[in-house]
Amino acid sequence: MEKKPFEDGDFYVTDPTSTKDGVSSYTSYTVKGKKVIDPVIRRYREFDCLRTKLFERWPGIFIPELPHKKAMGKNDKEVVDFRIEQINRFCVKLSNIPYLFNSSETQMFLQNTSDVIKTMNNLQNESYEDMLNKYQEAFPDFDDVSNNII
């Protein structure tokens, strides 16, 4: 069997599993990779939550895109296959941005937490000083740029 290109990545999704939960159904994906200690199972909405949290907590920073949500037919094979490819593109792009990949949000997402959405939603808001420190660590030349502006 030919090796898929994403399987060499820091993290990627594989093994979609459809589950019927009462009236609703959903697909979950196994998250694996070189930088994932133990594989974790995540749903699309959890990837969406990660992206939203990164967007909120890293203002002004490019956050990779995810495929749009789909209300109908989300468990169809074509949709699942498309989502796997697009989520894997998200994973590759995210892992190529070290400060986002190493962020508390992404690392929390990659841990085997049963309710990762609740955990992420309970993250405390960062103070201005915390955010400044985070940006200075992510961008070592940040002080040089900000001092030239003032």
Image: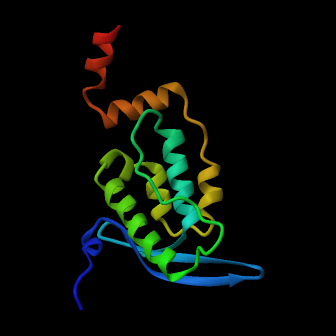
- The outermost residue toward the top is 150
Q: Residue at x 28, y 19 (%)?
A: 145
Residue in front for this viewpoint, 34 or 22:
22
Q: Is residue 134 above or below residue 100?
A: above
Residue in front for this viewpoint, 59 or 34:
59
Residue in front for this viewpoint, 104 or 80:
80
- The outermost residue toward the bottom is 1
Whole-percent x, y for residue 61 in the image? 40, 37
> Toward which corner of the image does residue 37 lie, by quadrant?
bottom left
Q: Residue at x 57, y 55 (%)?
A: 49
Whole-percent x, y for residue 44 in the image? 55, 66
Q: How many marks?
A: 0
Q: Residue at x 54, y 47 (%)?
A: 53
Side (left or right) of 19 relative to 98: right
Q: Residue at x 25, y 18 (%)?
A: 144
Q: In the picture, which quadrant includes the C terminus? A: top left
Whole-percent x, y for residue 101 in the image? 36, 53
